[in-house]
Image (tube, rainbow, N blue to C red):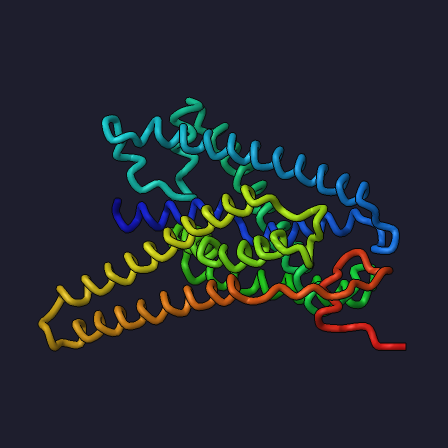
Amino acid sequence: PSHDAGVLSVSILGAVVMGHNFFLHSGLILSRLPPVRFQSRKSVTSALKYSTIESTVALFVSFLVNAAVVSVAGARLFPHRAEAAFASIGLRDASNLLGSVLDNEQLAKKAWGVALLCSGHCATVTGTYASQLIVEGFCGFERDHMQNSLLVNGATRLSAIVPALAAALIAGNRGSDYLVVLAQLVVALQLPFAVVPLLRFIGSDKVMGQTFHASPLLLNCGWGVLLLCSLANLLVIGQSFCDLGVRFSTSAGLWSSASLTSVLLILTLCFAIVAYLSLVANLITRDVIAVDINPDHHLHPSRNLLCPPKPT
């Protein structure tokens, strides 16, 4: 496959499996549970059951949407019947592709606009709430505290909207397509940093106990999927740097500045791969430490990692 095909494949993975949603769903489950002192096996099991139902329904609907998008694109872009008008389709002209199927250009434009609005709204809301939950958990903020809530909400939203708006304005109309792919590629690259701690936690008796400890089959499947995702990420990183190196090296002689640039790119590639693998290996081998939870706390038990209760 070409370099573009590899990047698109990994970006699709990042668009479907978003690491921040693990934090979001964990926060949703914790928000539905009573304080720790009143929790029972039945209440935890009930919360997990409804969370599983929600996730299953959401993933099934997402599968239907993705299948519809791929089917529409495949019907017009299949190699044996490819249409030149759709060779370089993007966000601005994707409605033309949809219009060729619906046979109604105005309806296609409206449907595409509504789809973009809904998808952008959903992605923004989930990302913002996930970042808010993470900041509250690390800093030990209580969600029902108005001052802390306003501070976290303002900080997370400003930190997200400012760079996104700046990148969109700088890239322009055509650059927005590349930014979308690049953003999902970054999400895919950081996926192991969310999945590895999750697998370590659900596989630890010290954290989950014997009752809610994940089965060996589930853990093995999770580690296998994580391995495949990591290999795909490394291949895309390597292929990207190699393509850049080939472009520089073929443009001039052996000792030219372009050739030296290709060498620097290869060295940077080696450093990036080693750093990436080292960080993932550190998460895999680090010991899991369980801490005591405040019995009156039910939103963010992790606050005690940073703010342990003072002895009385």
Point 85% across, 54% down: residue: 35
Image coordinates of residue 304 in percent, x first then y, are 75, 68
Q: Quadrant of residue 88?
A: top left
In the rendered image, the vertical position of residue 152 relative to residue 212, given as above or below: below
Image coordinates of residue 231 in percent, x first then y, are 37, 53
**Residue at the extreme top:** 103
Query: Considering depth in this image, is 285 or 181 the residue closer to the camera?
Result: 285
Q: Quadrant of the N terminus?
A: top left
Q: Quadrant of residue 185?
A: bottom left
Image coordinates of residue 173 in percent, x first then y, are 41, 52
Point 28% across, 62% down: residue: 241
Q: Quadrant of residue 198?
A: bottom right
- Is residue 57 left or right of 292 when viewed as pictured? left
Q: Quadrant of the C terminus?
A: bottom right
Label total for image: 0
Point 31% across, 71% down: residue: 268
Query: Considering depth in this image, is 242 or 101 the residue closer to the camera?
Result: 242
- Is residue 149 left or right of 157 when viewed as pictured? right
Query: Considering depth in this image, is 235 or 98 the residue closer to the camera?
Result: 235
Point 25% across, 26% down: residue: 81
**Residue at the extreme left:** 253
- Is residue 217 left or right of 201 when viewed as pictured? left
In the rendered image, the vertical position of residue 221 relative to residue 172, given as above or below: above
Q: Is residue 203 visible?
A: yes
Q: Is residue 136 visible?
A: no
**Residue at the extreme right:** 312
